[in-house]
Amino acid sequence: MVYRMIFNQEAYFGRGAIKEIPNVAKTHGFHKAFIVTDPVLLKTGTVKKVTDVLDAAGMPYEIFDNVKPNPPVECIQDGVAKFKSAGADFLIGLGGGSPQDTCKGIGIIAANPEFADVLSLEGTAATKNPSVPIFGVPTTAGTASETTINYVVTDTAKKRKFVAVDPHDIPLVAFVDPDMTDSMPRSLKVATGLDALTHAIEGFVTPGAWELSDCLSLQTIRMIADNLAKSADGDVEAGEKMAYASYITGMAYSNVGLGLVHGMAHALGGLLGVAHGVANGILLAPVMEYNKDYTGEKYRAIAHAFGDQDSYNPDRSIEEVREEAVQRIHKLTVDLGNPTTISEVGAKESDIDGLTENAFVDVCTGGNPRKPTKEDIHAIYESLM
Ligand SMILES: NC(=O)c1ccc[n+]([C@@H]2O[C@H](COP(=O)([O-])OP(=O)(O)OC[C@H]3O[C@@H](n4cnc5c(N)ncnc54)[C@H](O)[C@@H]3O)[C@@H](O)[C@H]2O)c1
Ligand SMILES: [Fe+2]
């Protein structure tokens, strides 16, 4: 067995990390930045934190702020056109997953114009050239797009999200600066934190996991268990840990894969526009329950991280501990106030067939430890009405 692991070339962590951007850009010989972000971040001053640093260093830039959540194909195409006329030689993906993923699409198409339709990038497209160099600057603590080889796009016409997996899109440098994530409102901290937790748990139990990815996934599960609720309640140090946890688990899942929670969450996001982390939070415990007999001893570690100090006791059956792990994750999502049904986020009975079809073919579903049938997926959605 040969394992492939792809990471950023360079990454900076800590409060003030964004101040390194101009020097790192100069080291690489870059002259002008094209900043990909969204209108909320521009209005609330988050973008200004980065442009102040660039202004002080005399580094020119152009801002593209036309990114929408669950970014559609059209956002990327608009960005490619603006990038071409900007005369920039590197990209800064500044935001949550939506701006960062849009940035990856722009960088890939600018370097591989034969994929200008965007749709042909679904799955593992054979791009020839690396993206225009990307600096990833996350403002949420969840997707880890700044360190992954994936990006997620909405096919507006078909109301479905698709994943592009391409080593050519990995950001060259990441700047994980908790000063950029402090401003998240509680609901966003909860949603993106549940996304990070889902990455950690799916990356931990996927068949592609191995010792190196397990180090990263398990440490993150512990960090999130200790810090997500505190961070949501405004604890700034816990927020800092969440920013790092998101990145650390991204290093693992980007390389080993995810699972059915993500496959089913993408279907909800594509059809109903449900925020990605909220959708994951609804599905995480039910899919853990569905997967539990296919996870070996791994749920012992999850139960332990979430406070079951006796989970490694050999006198306790693995079946009992697995159920404990599922219940503890369910309780977390309830305590955090995340919805627990898909009807709460607008799903109707008549949506379930379409959701099932899209979840079944989603790239992430292939990483699930238990191979689901369409009937299984249908039944899980049905149980969440
Ligand atoms: N590339 C990957 O590997 C990967 C992994 C998981 C998810 N995703 C994708 O990422 C997208 C979700 O990204 P997300 O959850 O980070 O949210 P997002 O980028 O969609 O942002 C959601 C909202 O939060 C606001 N926001 C972001 N940062 C803020 C801050 N610091 N303060 C206040 N408001 C802020 C944004 O302006 C936006 O209105 C989905 O499309 C999802 O499918 C990508
Ligand atoms: Fe995710």
Image: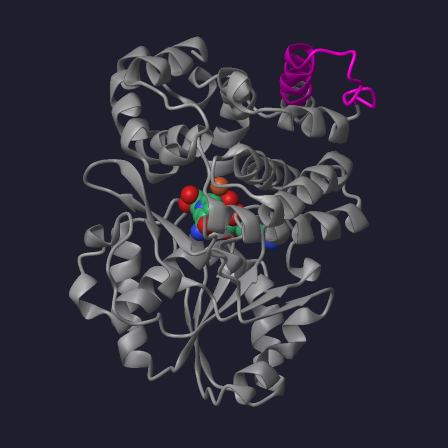
Picture coordinates of residue 376, whole percent (x, y): 36, 14
Residue drawn at x 48%, y 55% is 148
- Determine which quarter of the picture holds residue 301: top right
Q: Residue furthest front?
A: 1
Quadrant of image for the C terminus: top left
Residue visible at 69% across and 22% down?
335
Colour option used: one colour
For this rendering, which residue is in front, 114 or 42?
Answer: 114
Query: Going 62% across and 79% down the picture, which residue do you hit?
Result: 53
| 13 with respect to 98 (left or right) | right
Tell me if residue 288 comes above or below residue 6 in the rendering.
above
* Residue 181 % position (x, y): 65, 54
Residue 268 percent across, percent down from the top left: 37, 29
The reply, left or right, for residue 86 in relation to residue 237 is left
Q: Is residue 284 magenta?
A: no
**Can I make out residue 66 in this image?**
no
Specify whether residue 161 is in view.
Answer: yes
Towards the viewer: 245 or 332: 245
Of residues 108 and 97, the one drawn nearer to the viewer in this rendering: 108
The segment highlighted magenta reads 308-330
| 321 shown above or below 117 | above
- Residue 269 is situated, as x and y percent measured from the top left of the image, at 38, 34
Residue 321 on the magenta span: yes
